[in-house]
Image: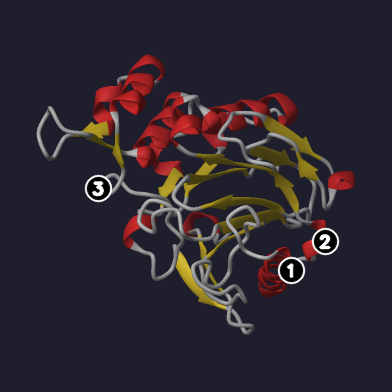
Amino acid sequence: MQRVLHPNGVITYTFDSLANQPVTAHVSTRHGGVSPAPWNTLNFSVKRGDESARVQENRQRFADAVGVNWRDVVYGHQVHGTTVAKVESSDAGRWFDATDGLITDAIDLPLSWVFADCVPVLLYDPVRHALGGCHAGWRGTVNGAAVATLWAMQAAYGSEPAQLLACIGPSIGPSSYEVGPEVVQMAQAKLPRPARFFRYPNGPEQNAYFDLWQANAQQLIQAGIPAAQIEISAIDTAQSTNDFFSHRAEHGQCGLFAMLAWLTER
């Protein structure tokens, strides 16, 4: 990924694999907003104690930095699920209820998701010029949120997995994400060959560490996306709190950062 400082002080990251594609995607950092600690400063959540006026100002600053109208941005009310909404031009500015995945083939329609350790997954179809993305925490990961987004693009636009580009953004990394047995048990029940996604650095009787990056990537590979077409940012939010919010590292006292993506004319 590339770090970008915008004239208004907002700092974002962009995906290398999309640099020459007619799609724009930015992942925000915590820099360039107006929120005080512990949400300092570019926070996109009103559910963590920050004031709505500050969050609205942050949304506008992010949109201004990357060149979109903040009133057009489409969001989902994220619930750690696998529901995917098909977004049309007429949905500009809409919030979709109980939705973690969004797909579109509309030009210049910005889609957005928010995170603080959960995994941003972005899919781009360069053949049919369609875009999809999702918010995948551990529940979304084990229940296949990324693949659900791929399937939704396949159903809506005829996307072929072998032609897609996939990006996995900043999120909690495999050396930071310690989980309890309930997470391991659900993964064992739902993921293909789940043992490869867990490490036990403190011994087999201790808690596991879960590799959400590979758990999402391998599901996309199994669904037909070539491994060479999947970009993993490898930015661990729990070890990068200078740039990103981390629910785990900051003990829940933090804001949320965002991913904003849209199709451009080709």
Front disc: 1 or 3: 1
The quarter in which the N terminus is drawn is bottom left
Tag 1: amino acid: Ala
Real-space Cα separation, disc 1 to disc 3, in angstroms:
36 Å
Figure check: 144 above or below 226: above
Tag 3: amino acid: Ser
Q: Which mark is residue 53?
A: 1
Real-space Cα separation, disc 2 to disc 1, in angstroms:
15 Å
Q: Which residue is mark 3?
A: 175
Q: Residue at x 34, y 24 (%)?
A: 182
Q: Which residue is mark 2?
A: 71
Label 3: how many Cα within 10 Å (few below 14, some 14–19, many 20+): some
Tag 2: amino acid: Arg
Q: Secondary structure at mark 3?
A: loop
- Image-based side of 262 in relation to 4, left or right: right
Real-space Cα separation, disc 2 to disc 3, in angstroms:
38 Å
Q: Earlier in the sequence, mark 1 or mark 3?
A: 1
Figure check: 133 above or below 41: above
